[in-house]
């Protein structure tokens, strides 16, 4: 809806920035704005989002917990990368580029972080459906099992990136630990788990759960954005690109299958994206990108 409302006001040469740039935004913009207008604009994405904040009073008060200081950007067309790096540096601070806008869609941020954390936390809950006694702190009560799941997802993602590079689509996509802990926060934590449990920027955030009226316990909110965005616009996008380059993703599949069963969806079946539900995701197949050649053509 935002792009549709902007369309009449867009002019050649303008720049559109999105943050954190996940979810195939450039494919969506191409679909909504049309090829001719899309080609006259510059789109760039900023990772991570500049602010950590939470709504305290909707429409009135949103406290900012953390203002980040180091960023990476990707853009389309790639010829504009120097100009958008400088623009972002002026607005937010230290900025480097990560290459193609596709890198932004594949960056290990929300989809590598939120679903694996919740899968690890709630795997046993799905067997009994018994409300949890407490709503855990999302980061401060992180466990090594949670971050091990993140590492498994990230490893499959990096295999996809390596296969893309072999096909000529070069981009800088790191491990989540190297990006968040070392690059963004310059944290000296030795492990991803210690980073999340001790980093002040992540203090106080609870898991996406609702309190059960009857038991007063806590049950997962599968309508929360950690599911409704990070599964179809995150892990399913990774899965779609993986299919284009022939990379198997059993760890990503495991989390998608678990989540879709609780969301009333069927994004994948027998290890493959389901065509009927691909339209509900931002996997490349939704946009008619059904081969590596077609994907490469988008960034030629």
Image (cartoon, helix red, strand yellow):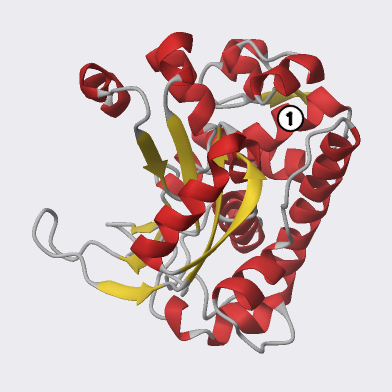
In this rendering, would 199 be left or right of 248?
left
Is residue 46 in view from this perspective?
no
Identify which residue, 166 or 190, lies in the foreground.
166
Asked whether, in this view, residue 249 is left or right of residue 204, the answer is right
Q: Residue at x 65, y 21 (%)?
A: 298
SS class, disc 1: helix
Binning the other alpha carbons within 10 Å of mark 1 as few (below 14), some (14 to 19) or many (20 upward) gives many
* Whole-percent x, y for residue 244 in the image: 80, 23
Q: Position of residue 241 (x, y in %)?
A: 73, 30
Residue drawn at x 75%, y 52% is 153
Residue where numbered disc 1 is placed? 241
Q: Residue at x 80, y 56 (%)?
A: 152
In the rendered image, which quarter contains the N terminus?
Answer: top left
Where 12 falls versus 84 (above or below)? above
Q: Is residue 123 left or right of residue 35?
A: right
Q: Residue furthest left?
A: 60
- Where is 63 relative to 155, above or below? below
Decide which of 130, 108 is in the foreground and name it: 108
Front residue of 230 and 132: 230
- Percent coordinates x, y for residue 288 in the rendering: 63, 10
Residue 241 visible in rendering = yes
Up the image or down, 290 lies above or below 283; here it is: above
- Residue 147 sits in quarter: bottom right
Residue 141, x across and y down, in percent = 55, 79
Total number of numbered discs in the rendering? 1
* Viewport quadrant of the C terminus: top right
Residue 145 appears left or right of 122: right
């Amino acid at each position: 809806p935002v792009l549709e409302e902007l369309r009449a006001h867009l002019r050649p040469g303008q720049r559109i920035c999105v943050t954190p740039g996940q979810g195939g935004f450039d494919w969506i913009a191409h679909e909504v704005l049309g090829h001719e207008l899309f080609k006259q604009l510059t789109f760039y994405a900023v990772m991570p989002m500049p602010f950590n904040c939470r709504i305290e009073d909707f429409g009135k008060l949103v406290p900012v917990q953390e203002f980040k200081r180091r960023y990476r950007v990707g853009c389309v067309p790639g010829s504009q990368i120097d100009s958008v790096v400088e623009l972002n540096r002026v607005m937010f601070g230290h900025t480097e580029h990560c290459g193609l806008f596709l890198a932004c869609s594949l960056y290990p941020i929300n989809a590598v972080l939120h679903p694996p954390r919740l899968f690890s936390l709630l795997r046993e809950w799905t067997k009994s459906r018994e409300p949890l006694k407490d709503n855990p702190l999302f980061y401060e009560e992180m466990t090594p099992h949670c971050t091990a799941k993140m590492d498994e997802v990230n490893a499959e993602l990096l295999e996809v990136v390596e296969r893309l590079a072999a096909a000529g689509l070069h981009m800088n996509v790191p491990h989540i630990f190297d990006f968040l802990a070392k690059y963004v926060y310059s944290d000296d934590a030795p492990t991803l788990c210690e980073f999340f449990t001790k980093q002040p920027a992540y203090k106080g955030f609870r898991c996406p759960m609702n309190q059960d009226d009857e038991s007063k316990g806590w049950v997962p909110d599968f309508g929360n954005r950690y599911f409704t965005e990070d599964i179809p616009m995150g892990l399913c996008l990774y899965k779609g690109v993986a299919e284009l380059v022939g990379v198997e993703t059993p760890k990503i599949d495991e989390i998608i299958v678990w989540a879709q069963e609780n969301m009333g969806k069927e994004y994948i079946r027998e290890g493959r994206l389901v065509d009927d539900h691909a339209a509900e995701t931002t996997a490349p197949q939704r946009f008619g990108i059904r081969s590596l050649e077609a994907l490469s053509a988008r960034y030629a």
